[in-house]
Image (cartoon, rainbow, N blue to C red):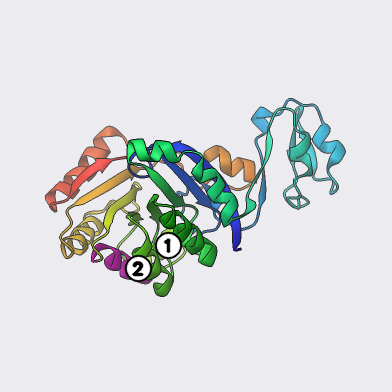
Amino acid sequence: MSQGMIYNIQRMSLHDGPGLRTTVFLKGCPLTCLWCSNPESQQVKAQMMCFTDLCTGCGKCAEVCPNDAVIEIEGRFGRDTEKCTNCGACTENCAGKAREMSGKIMTVEEVMDVVRKDALFYDNSGGGVTFGGGEPTSGGQFFLDMVEAAVNEGYHVTVDTCGYCPEERFDKTIKLADLFLFDCKHMNPEEHKKLTGVDNAIILRNMGAALSSGKEVRIRMPLMPEMNDSEENIAAMAEFLKGYGRDKVEVMPCHAFGRNKYAALGWKYKMDREYTPEQLDVVFKRFADHGLKTEII
């Protein structure tokens, strides 16, 4: 039975497809977006997250750490990221829940055991199962096995994807899934690479395959000030989408909700900008001028 790294399973989700859903978050992503709000999803390995603002100062973490990686800062306990091996010993003894492990190896059956708990709610609300990440398709055969298991049990399946996936695997996914929530970050390959670490050739190929498949596809755009909101980029997106008879984009204006997660991982937060209402009005006019309808999600 295949297995893989899961960092969260969120039950009763309302924003990852129609109806009430269970969203399965796989760990691992080939992109490193500057604005990523779930940095703990990027690496496939399990990681310890240390939220020092929740620390009660009990010091139990320091007592059990085998690597002397716990450091005291003004009465609270943080960690030395150079020494920490993500073993998780400290998380088992943290009274304030300031330390937690992100990432757990699970089998397909273990995931489905959680999914089945809310089957009645899926039926009554028109919901189902959503696979997200990270990038869920990066889970390879484990991902495909989970999708197939969900389909075989009659659940509506949504895949929340950036589209960076080998063609063969993505084409298999298209045949299985009911709905795609497809991120479109930038149309220019060089700019896409600057912002995410990879170019967008395979992404646009897979987006086109999904759009022409007859399956439901919702194009989503994380909107970043002076990064992907230019007249040129929006015009290029409109031209691409209109080639497939599409004229709507779900937009996600930038936010700083993930800032504390970067600190918890010991990483530097790189995005420190947000839109004013006036700036958003200008950007939305660009979409409208190019015939694209927008919905903020």
Q: Is residue 79 left or right of residue 220?
A: right
Q: Is residue 37 above or below residue 31?
A: above
Crowd around label 1: few <14 · some 14–19 · many ≥20 (10 Å) = some
Q: Is residue 96 left or right of residue 71?
A: left
Q: State the separation of the CA atoms marked 1 and 2.
A: 9 Å
| Span shown in magenta | 202-212
Q: Is residue 211 magenta?
A: yes
In front: 96, or 211? 211
Badge 2 is on which residue? 189
Percent across and percent down for residue 132 are 46, 51
Crowd around label 2: few <14 · some 14–19 · many ≥20 (10 Å) = some
Q: Is residue 203 left or right of residue 110?
A: left
Which quadrant of the rendered structure holds the N terminus? bottom right
Could you say whether the residue bearing mark 1 is in a helix, strand or loop?
helix
Q: Is residue 196 magenta?
A: no
Is residue 125 in view from this perspective?
yes
Could you say whether the residue bearing mark 2 is in a helix, strand or loop?
helix
Q: Residue at x 83, y 37 (%)?
A: 62
- Three-letter amino acid code at disc 1? Lys
Percent across and percent down for residue 164 are 42, 65
Q: Is residue 76 above or below residue 37?
A: above
Percent across and percent down for residue 230 are 26, 53
Are dots 1 and 2 in contact, CB under 8 Å? no
Which quadrant of the rendered structure holds the C terminus? top left
- Three-letter amino acid code at disc 2? Pro
Q: Residue at x 78, y 34 (%)?
A: 93
In primary-sequence order, the first of circles 1 and 2 is 2
Q: Residue at x 27, y 33 (%)?
A: 277
Q: Which mark is residue 87?
A: none
Classify residue 276 by image quadrant.
Answer: top left
Percent across and percent down for residue 124 are 35, 35
Q: Which mark is residue 194?
A: 1
